[in-house]
Image (cartoon, grey):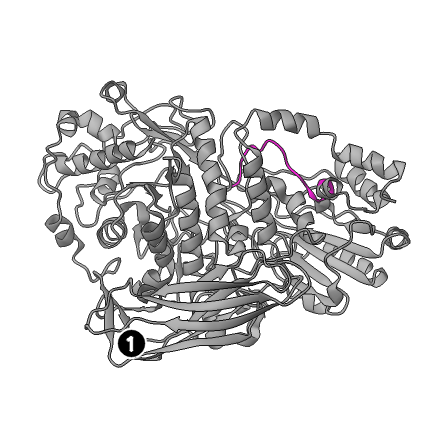
Amino acid sequence: MGSSLEQDSVRAKNSGRTQDEEKRRQESAVDEKEIALARAAAAEACVLLKNDGHVLPLKKEEEVAVFGRCQYDWFYVGYGSGGDVNPPYLVNLMEGLDNCGAAYNWKLAETYRTWTQDPRYAADAGFWGHWPMSHPEMPVTEELVRAAALTSKTALIVIGRAAGEDRENTRTKGSYYLTDEETSLLDQVTAVFDRVVVVMDIGNIMDMAWTKNYADRLQAILICWQGGMESGNALCDVLYGDMAPCGRLADSIAVHYEDYSSSANFGNKEFNDYAEGIFVGYRYFDTFAKDKVLYPFGYGLSYTDFQMEVLSFTAPELREKIATPAGEMAASVRVTNTGSRPGKDVVLLWCSQPEGRMEKATKILAGFVKTKTLAPGESEELQIKTSLAQIASYDEEQSAFVLEKGDYRFFITEGGEDALQAGTWTIEEERITEQCEKAMTRDVDLKARILERMPEENKDPLIQSLSDEELEALTRGHGMMNSDLGVEGNAGAFGGVLESLREKGIRPVITSDGPAGLRLARYCALLICGTGQACTFNERLIEELYAKVGEEMVYHGTDVFLGPGMNIHRNPLCGRNFEYFSEDPLLSGKMAAAVVRGIQRSGKAACPKHFACNNQEVCRNINDARVSERALREIYLKNFEICVREGNPKTIMTSYNKINGVWSHYNYDLVTTVLRRQWGFDGVVITDWWMKKSKSPEFPELEDNAYRVRAQVDVLMPGSMNRLAKSYQSDGTLLKTLGQPEGIKRAELQRTAQNVLNLLKRLS
């Protein structure tokens, strides 16, 4: 069938856009290396959940019957500012099959292609905050399925889902759950075909309990995630064995939604009580509910087999009462490909902490590493490092990270539950690894803390030369998105937003949305979603990929990439989970740091977001995350800390929500006490686009922008409190108390100005 005139005709229809796409690619900065990296990342993200009878990989010469409208109406990424990239081309599954020369049932493909292009059934693109979660399936008859089975031995069923900014997934059919039409499709196809493969084109975890109902009727299940513009090519690389699947789950998949520890406290409009504390994801399941897990964190199969051997384990010798948090432990591991195909493996290092005064999870991820591609019989020796900071617990009584006395047991896993003991490290008495300050709680005299740490007047000649109006202008953006100071489609500008500032050599800083690629009115690479990136467990690959995005920034003249998105997957319904990495703070922080390092190689700036606790989209501007200091320190801030310490981002973005009653964009303890003083961040902090009005409880005469600047949130973006503004506007709230008792100080304005000027010096 693969060489028939009819199938050639279908291929021609599928590839009719090729010349136009090539022209668009030539008008972009997307080069062959970036395409190869994007394809490799999307392929390495694929997680193989099941492969009974080794149905996969498929053979290109054997015809496959593809069911499901997403074969054409592919979900390449999620919705909103994090995914609305203008790519030079897109490759869906059917185009991927064409490109790799695989045989498929052309009559069935033509039926789907014709139906999806019929205006009566065409996919609805929706609009902001009202995008489709899925598309209605084409009705399938028994005759159609049986006709396909006459020439095709294997059926491929595609299930697609999407979510996005300002909109949550919902516990409804077509979002978190299968539709009746999808269930019917599964029933009909599995009743006729003996070999059925399900491909899941998703960006967020969805309900998977249905897989148990088809236990013996589904031979393979593959999550390919939303792979960006190279989706179809990357998926076919895995389906046909050009690359063995090597992705591992970055999240636990529970049997039922109610099994997640946050399920009772998610989606509330006014506030969410983080009653689960530190017990998020596998920390909860491994400790309290192992039987509630369908597929565990870190799970993933391959086309080959691996054998691991622990070679050595080293740990520091503690002599002092206070231990350095950077003290390292390391496990050396040999991984051997014992199968018959080349492939990569992911090795996870876990730590089981001793029980003490503080409740602990059964295990926490301490480190991970990915092998190179190993040929059959080939071995690689790897070292997985972790630090005392990673295995310490936050003691709210001491306001410190501590190692409680006892045995710290380390073990290794790969792709499943089987564990190898790596070593045990015992400490005889409790150690403090890092002394902190109590922060973001109600029992802190925040006013006294702020007054005690007021900045001194800045003597820099340029800073001294700035007028009050110019100092204020440096604390806000140009006023609108798509500023005329930068490339068309930019997210906004800050810095030299006044002509007088530009005359003094202070140029505009141009921002562009991310993280799945540059969101501009130009052709830019559309990359795999954040969840998929985390499932690669490949820091080096992701860093190289985003180094190419940094080169695109140079080409297009943008300075700040608004990404990576890196909030914790607290709940599977969060609409922006596709932008974010994982339920685990270490994996999230490490992958984010890789993105930052890649972007900033070209002298540009990455801007991790949303700092912090942006874990739901419903009422995100008013919702209060009520969370313990320990959970903040160990889960919701830990990933940002890792990113700051290992990636050194030049900018960072606050979130819309409140944390324990205080909006992030006014949160002195979040931004100054923790981010700047404890972690040593020396860059610019910007708001998410627009912010809520509020007065300072500590200094009632301060409101809005004065309240923000006192917290050392440097820049309001896009610059105006009025969403309809078309130019730079001042609302007057920053300067009206200048010089008054407890009013805003000129030194505070100078501090923000210095932060912005320092950023300009670091940008190339």
Quadrant housing the N terminus: top right
Quadrant housing residue 32: top right
Report whether 648 appears left or right of 231: left
Q: Is residue 719 magenta?
A: no
Please report the residue visible at 23 percent of the width from the left and 60 percent of the height from the top: 442
Residue 289 visible, this orientation = no
Asked whether 94 falls inside the magenta stretch, the response is yes
Q: Give the extent of the magenta segment.
A: 83-95
> Residue 79, how many percent across, how many down?
54, 42
Can residue 283 be seen? yes
**In the picture provided, is 719 more to the left or to the right than 439?**
right
Q: Is residue 118 left or right of residue 335?
A: right
Quadrant assignment for the C terminus = top left
The amino acid at mark 1 is Glu
Q: Secondary structure at mark 1?
A: loop
Residue that badge 1 annotates: 404
